[in-house]
Amino acid sequence: MNARRALQVLSFLLGVSYLAALPAYPYAASPVVEGLSIAILAVLPWMLRPVRHRRNAGLLSAALIASSAGDVLLDAGPERLFVPGLCAFLAAHLIYAALFVTNRSCWEEVKTPRRVLLIAVPIYVFLISIWLIPDTGPLKIPVAIYIVAITAMASTALGSRFSWRVPGGALLFVMSDTLLAIAKFKGAFRARDYLVWATYYAAQYLIVTGALENGGKLPA
């Protein structure tokens, strides 16, 4: 097993461990396990030598590091550190969007399923926002800004030239954040923690492996 594959396996095992340990949450090591499961993925763009496309590798790594920071903040203080955690994920979405825009496809190259989703995603987010935002209280503005950012991230992923894994991961990210927002602002529901983490980890894993799919190299 090469080093790159070993890191992917380690990240996956940490992600599964975090999921399996959710019945014991909160516990002292949970922020470390959660944060490392994503932070390890940030090393992957730099594993091959030479790193030809440093800008893309840097953007992908930065988005994952920002996400990992958000994980740690939200795990360590779900209420007290909610806004800083939200800001970390806001940064991650903006960085992802920059990566996807840098690697955008011409409209003629965007296949019909992606074109349909480019229309459907903003409509879905708009309808969910109408339902959720009235219950966000003093967090209305931060949440609204975050919603715009994650919509931009998902839309630019759909319009990128990356493989299906990247837009698939972006859509799972939207789903995970939708579930998290429903649990926070509308009320807890059964298996929420499992569903939120499973969709979130799958989203990050698909994005990074999809971006590195062609022999582990980011496009020019």
Image (cartoon, grey):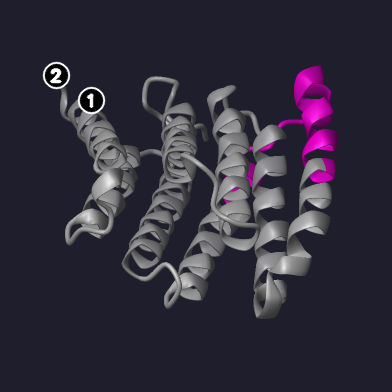
Check contact, mark 1 vs mark 2: CB within 8 A: yes
> Which residue is most to the bottom?
138
Residue 3 shown left or right of residue 205 in the figure: left
Give the residue type that dot 1 points to.
Arg
- Circle 1 is placed at which residue position? 5
Residue 180 shown left or right of residue 19 in the figure: right
Residue 194 falls in image quadrant: top left
Residue 146 shown left or right of residue 213 in the figure: right
Residue 109 in the image, given as x and y percentages of width and height? 77, 22
Q: Nearer the viewer, residue 102 or 162?
A: 162
Residue 102 in the image, given as x and y percentages of width and height? 62, 45
- Circle 2 is placed at which residue position? 1
Magenta part, dominant SS? helix
Q: Residue at x 46, y 53 (%)?
A: 63
Give the residue type that dot 2 points to.
Met
* Highlighted range, magenta: 96-123
When the figure is inspected, residue 215 is found, relative to residue 17, above or below; the finding is above
